[in-house]
Image (spheres, rainbow, N blue to C red):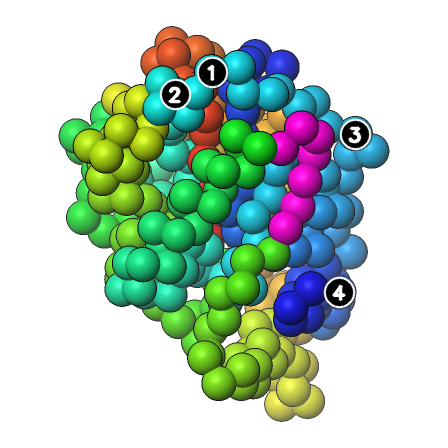
Amino acid sequence: MEEAGIATVVIGSAWDIVTHCGVPRYLHNDLPLGNPLGKPYDSASQRGSVIAALEMVVDAEEPVATQSDLKWQQDGDESWKENYMRITEADLANLKKAGEDNRAQRLAAKKAGMTRGQT
Amino acid sequence: MPSEPIKYIDRTRAFYAAQDFRPYNYAHHDSTPFHRLRKPLAECRVAIVLTAVTNGDIPKNLRGAESHAIADVPEKFRTDELSWDKVTTHTDDRQSFFPLEVLQSLESERMIGSLAPRYHFVPTEYSQRNTRENDAPALVDACIEDEVDIALLIPL
């Protein structure tokens, strides 16, 4: 995109993945995956994210990654961060089974030609 | 850093290890192309690129990049098959990941030149080669055709 003369900016919520990848401009909102622009129905925050991202495009002279001050809980409670992909002892057998099912499904899809063909 | 972001790479590694999958090698680049904006924001055309699904009829394994007319934006995108925090939040508010109304408003306020006539879907792909060799070039072609200056990339 950049080489074609199109300036890009990522607005997302996975700091480590995006900065590991390396992108021209990244605005990080520290929110649960699913609402990268702001909390549901928080139109002021959503608008603020878009404007902040556009300002990055205007201002940045080199690759940049920055974190906004948006919070999921105003009181600073970050217990939601424990939820995503949490593994408990009770989950282990189910996860192992899910892995086996997933591999079987992928193999069947490959055999049926139902893939894009590259990994 | 005002707050400590979740370490998704570590967390997904543990999650998939519990399913006996090999660790995923996340994309990594030592340098990135960088295009400096050459005209005022008020003259720029802006496009939205997202990972939420418009066309759920195409099987996930076969889905590639798609471009759709802004006039055809669905009221609800399909997000169920994507990885996001389904315990903590929901995706019922389209504007929390697809800023159509915000960009329309910025266009009418003349902060941006225009909203591009099409938005673009790029699949969340295991295969980085598919992203690099198929989806990205298709996205670039569509954006050039639409004379896009700025692309907002908004992964769910």
Verify CB contact (< 8 Å) between mark 3 and mark 4: no
Q: Are marks 2 and 3 on the same chain?
A: yes
First along the sequence among labels 1 and 2: 1
Tell me the mark number nearer the camera, choosing from 1 and 4: 1
Residue A35 to residue A119: above or below: below
Residue B120 vertical placement versus B97 (above, below): above
Question: CB of mark 1 within 8 Å of CB of mark 4?
Answer: no
Upstream in the sequence, badge 1 or badge 4? Answer: 4
Numbered circles on residues, count:
4
Of residue B44 and residue B52, the one placed in the foreground of this image is B44
Distance from Cα at disc 4 to Cα at disc 2: 39 Å
Q: Earlier in the sequence, mark 2 or mark 3?
A: 3
Q: Which residue is mark 3?
A: B31
Q: Are marks 3 and 1 in contact (CB under 8 Å)?
A: no
Q: Nearer the viewer, mark 3 or mark 4?
A: 3
CA distance for labels 3 and 4? 23 Å
> Separation of disc 2 and disc 3 at Cα?
26 Å
- Closer to the chain start, of discs 3 and 1, is 3
Looking at the picture, how far across and down is residue B40, in whole percent?
Answer: 43, 20
Mark sitting on residue B10: 4
Say whether marks 1 and 2 touch (CB < 8 Å).
yes
**Compared to B72, does A51 lie above or below?**
below
User: Quick one: SS at disc 3?
Assistant: loop
Determine which residue is flagged by label 1: B39
Q: Which residue is mark 2?
A: B44
Please determine if labels 3 and 1 lie on a single subunit.
Answer: yes
Q: What is the magenta range?
A: A60-66
The chain identifier of the residue carrying mark 1 reads B
- Spatial CA distance of label 1 from label 4 is 41 Å
